[in-house]
Image (cartoon, helix red, strand yellow):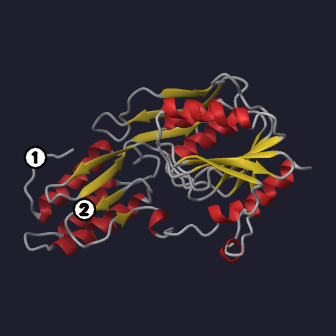
Amino acid sequence: MLNPEYDNKAIDNFECLWNNYDRNYGQFIVRNINWDSLYAVYRPLLDEHTTDEELYNVFGNLIFHFHDDHVFIDPVGTRLPRIESGRSDTMKIQTDFSPETVENYLTVKLRYSEHIWYGMLPNNIGYIQMDQFSDSKDFIVKAFDKILEELRDTRGLVFDIRKLEGGDDRVGKYIAGRFASESKLYMTSRKRNGPAPDDFEPAIRWYVVPEGNYQYTNPVILLTGRFTASAGETFTWAMNENAGVTQVGDTTLGAFSDIMAMELPNGWIHTVSVGDYRNAGGDNLEGIGVAPDIFARSSKSETVVNIDRGLEKALELLNP
């Protein structure tokens, strides 16, 4: 979205960015951010002589206060790197998980599509790994009809989302429903729709319900990590409402809300988290993440020698 009321000057670019967050950001109250006070700090740093590099630095310092992994600024048309607000800026490379390491544990590995792998672990344990929920629901329905039919007779299953970056919450809802035996509330979501920080649309209630022609209800270990984000986290909420699911690994990233991308007069793109997402208990975990039932994470030195502590703990739990 581009707001035409501003000129391409440093001050106007600042005003445009500040107002876009002021009118649309959904987490000022949850994150205890006094946005007006930040305006008073950073706006006086700019004048008609401010360079792109100086504006870039002011923007970086400003959005740092969000600590929000869904907030970033992409300085399009420059050689300046993208500005990250949350932990993503320091979590460039995942060191506690490697698909190649997982392969050493699998007895069978099959690739269904670009974002879905599955197979078998020792002692008749099934395995599914996904890294995005970007496929259409129709595609996912066919995929899980095939995969769960092939894994139907397994004693238990490991669902690995330690590298799942996000995607469509509705896809995650459907997949979680393939493991559901009853209808359970798992999330409420609402989006900002007015000038005040507490102006929101009515909340939408999300339920995980049995989906498809077959539901897998044997024990499931859901493997999560700090790179499990966004739709992967709302999926974690849904799966955790299913009987027989145990979350193992590390706490998820803590970035649940939908986002909106907006353009500044200078062409730079910035994203705004517009929602307030809460689990079934009413807790907002933005910036916190979903903690596992059982913590198990490999160190970097273990990963490079093909040791996967999360997967080993999952196998231990499924092979008592």
Q: Can residue 176 be seen?
A: no
Secondary structure of the residue carrying tag 1 is loop
Please name whichever residue, 196 or 163, is drawn nearer the observer in this view of the structure: 163
* Residue 101 spot, x, y in % from top left: 69, 65
Cα gap from disc 2 to disc 1, whole angstroms: 24 Å
Q: In terms of image quadrants, where is residue 82?
A: bottom left
Q: In terms of image quadrants, where is residue 252?
A: bottom right
Comes first in the chain, label 2 or label 1: 1
Name the residue rendered at 56%, 30% in the picture: 141
Name the residue rendered at 76%, 43% in the picture: 157
In the figure, is residue 274 to the left or right of 223? left
In the figure, is residue 66 to the left or right of 45? right
Query: Do callouts 2 and 1 mark residues in contact (Cβ within 8 Å)?
Result: no
* Residue 281 spot, x, y in % from top left: 63, 35
Mark 1, Cα crowd under 10 Å, few <14 / some 14-19 / many 20+, is few
**Identity, as a three-letter code, of the amino acid under mark 1:** Pro
* Residue 184 spot, x, y in % from top left: 66, 26
Would you name the residue on which mark 2 appears? 40
Secondary structure of the residue carrying tag 2 is helix
Name the residue rendered at 71%, 68% in the picture: 298
Please name whichever residue, 263 or 221, is drawn nearer the observer in this view of the structure: 221
Q: Can residue 184 be seen?
A: yes
> Height in image: 70 above or below 215?
below
Mark 2, Cα crowd under 10 Å, few <14 / some 14-19 / many 20+, is few
Which mark, residue 4? 1
Specify the quadrant that holds the N terminus: top left
